[in-house]
């Protein structure tokens, strides 16, 4: 059984301020959650394969295909300002 003192202790560790009625409600809710987990523990799962998803899914990413990219000269051709082979941009942090 999860006592109200346990709930208050965990709330204090978490720096959560709870009212008296919230502590009572949380104590009951947590007890229900623990009871449900106990019910789940009784299920036979020895012959069930672990899954990460309920539905069968597959990777939808495309294959990496190496393609030629712009040369440095072509890329810098589109810049407004350049300095020593690099893009020059305005300073935004002082």
Image: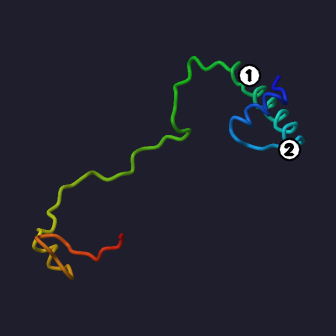
Residue 15 image label: none
Q: Are marks 2 and 1 in contact (CB under 8 Å)?
A: no
Q: Residue furthest front?
A: 94
Residue 91, compared with residue 6, is above or below; it is below
User: Residue 36, position in %: x, y?
Assistant: 76, 28
Residue 79, compared with residue 65, is above or below; it is below
Local crowd size for mark 2, using a 10 Å CA cut-off: few (<14), some (14–19), many (≥20): few
User: Residue 57, position in %: x, y?
Assistant: 46, 43
User: Residue 81, position in %: x, y?
Assistant: 19, 80
User: Residue 80, position in %: x, y?
Assistant: 21, 82
The one of 40 and 29 positioned closer to us in this rendering: 29
Residue at point 83%, 22% (across, down): 1
Name the residue tied to disc 1. 38
At numbered mark 2, what does the secondary structure look like: helix, strand or loop?
loop
At numbered mark 1, what does the secondary structure look like: helix, strand or loop?
helix
Q: Nearer the viewer, mark 2 or mark 1?
A: 2
Name the residue tied to disc 2. 19
Q: Image quadrant for the C terminus?
A: bottom left
- 18 relative position to 41: left or right: right
Residue at point 56%, 38% (across, down): 54
Quadrant of res 17: top right
> Which tag, 2 or 1, sits closer to the chain's start?
2
What is the CA distance from the residue labelled 2 to the residue labelled 1? 28 Å
Residue at point 11%, 71% (across, down): 84
Quadrant of res 16: top right
Local crowd size for mark 1, using a 10 Å CA cut-off: few (<14), some (14–19), many (≥20): few
The one of 38 and 88 positioned closer to us in this rendering: 88
Residue at point 74%, 37% (across, down): 11
């Amino acid at each position: 059984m999860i006592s109200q003192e346990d709930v208050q202790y965990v709330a204090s560790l978490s720096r959560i301020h709870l009212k008296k009625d919230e502590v009572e409600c949380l104590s009951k809710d947590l007890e229900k959650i623990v009871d449900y987990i106990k019910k789940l523990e009784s299920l036979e799962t020895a012959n069930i394969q672990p899954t990460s998803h309920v539905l069968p899914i597959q990777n939808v990413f495309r294959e990496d295909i190496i393609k030629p990219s712009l040369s440095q000269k072509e890329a810098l051709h589109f810049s407004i300002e350049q300095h020593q082979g690099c893009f020059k941009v305005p300073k935004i942090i002082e």
